[in-house]
Image (spheres, rainbow, N blue to C red):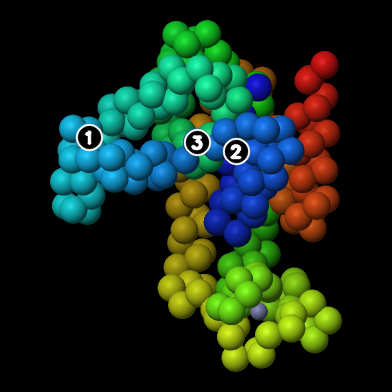
């Protein structure tokens, strides 16, 4: 099965993508990673991408499509993809459908994690990483205590680039951009809304039950 995963900042999309990949033995496709890999490989496409990045521009849809074709044509990944952070617009979504058809595949599920803006903000603002043991905590939802963390609290680090206003902007920008894409998949009867508000394991349980419902 091929899956697309959507979720605003603070919805825990990255964590759930990891869970899905591990549990169902799938391959994660992030266009950001694909772009970086291409630049590192020093390919012709890579140098084109690099010059765009250096100018601070986004990669145009045709470059993204080329990268997606590479994945879809790779038999190793056949029918076991989790698209994360892609498609980003309606054109990419429509193009993806055409490409999937060309490579004899389809999207099985589109999952959209839903989370309240307030909770998303708290999740991001409260995030604390231990620079020593790399464990991740949350000031509001999963605070470090003597029981769950042995290092000195001085090692706890907060992501410095996140302030409330920036997070709210990113959140609202996501909703604006993504709504038309979600409607597109809703019309195709592929969209599943996931309540992204609870514990990570509870959220994954919802996802797992949806993904296994048609597995048979
Ligand atoms: Zn630690």
Identify the residue at image location x=75%, y=71%: 141
Q: Is residue 1 above or below residue 17?
A: above
Q: CA distance from mark 2 to mark 1?
A: 29 Å
Judged from the image, the secondary structure of the residue bearing numbered disc 1 is loop
Q: Which mark is residue 193?
A: none
Q: Is residue 10 above or below residue 125?
A: above
Q: Residues within 10 Å of mark 3 (few under 14, many from 20)?
A: many
Identify the residue at image location x=59%, y=68%: 124
Residue identified by numbered label 1: 43
Query: In the image, ligand 1 is in what quadrant?
Result: bottom right
Q: Residues within 10 Å of mark 1 (few under 14, many from 20)?
A: few
Residue 34 in sight here = yes
Left or right: 24 in relation to 69: right
Which quadrant is the C terminus positioned in? top right
Identify the residue at image location x=59%, y=51%: 14
Judged from the image, the secondary structure of the residue bearing numbered disc 2 is strand
Residue 187 in sight here = no
> What is the x, y in percent for residue 30?
47, 40
Which quadrant is the N terminus positioned in? top right
Q: CA distance from mark 1 to mark 3?
A: 19 Å
Q: Which mark is residue 29?
A: 3
């Amino acid at each position: 099965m091929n899956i697309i995963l959507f979720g605003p900042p603070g919805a825990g999309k990255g964590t759930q993508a990891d869970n899905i990949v591990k549990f169902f033995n799938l391959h994660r496709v992030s266009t950001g990673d694909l772009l970086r890999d291409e630049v590192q490989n020093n390919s012709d496409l890579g140098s084109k991408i690099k010059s765009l990045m250096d100018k601070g521009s986004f990669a145009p849809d045709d470059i993204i499509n080329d990268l997606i074709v590479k994945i879809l044509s790779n038999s190793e990944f056949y029918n076991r993809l989790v698209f994360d952070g892609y498609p980003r617009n309606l054109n990419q979504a429509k193009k993806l459908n055409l490409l999937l058809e060309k490579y004899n595949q389809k999207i099985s599920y589109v999952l959209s994690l839903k989370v309240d803006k307030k909770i998303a903000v708290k999740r991001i603002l409260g995030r604390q990483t231990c620079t020593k043991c790399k464990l991740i905590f949350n000031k509001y939802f999963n605070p470090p205590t003597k029981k769950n963390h042995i290092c000195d609290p001085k090692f706890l680090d907060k992501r410095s680039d996140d302030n409330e206003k920036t997070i709210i902007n990113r959140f609202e920008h996501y909703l604006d951009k993504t709504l038309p894409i979600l409607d597109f998949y809703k019309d195709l009867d592929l969209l599943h809304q996931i309540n992204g508000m609870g514990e990570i394991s509870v959220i994954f349980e919802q996802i797992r039950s949806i993904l296994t419902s048609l597995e048979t």
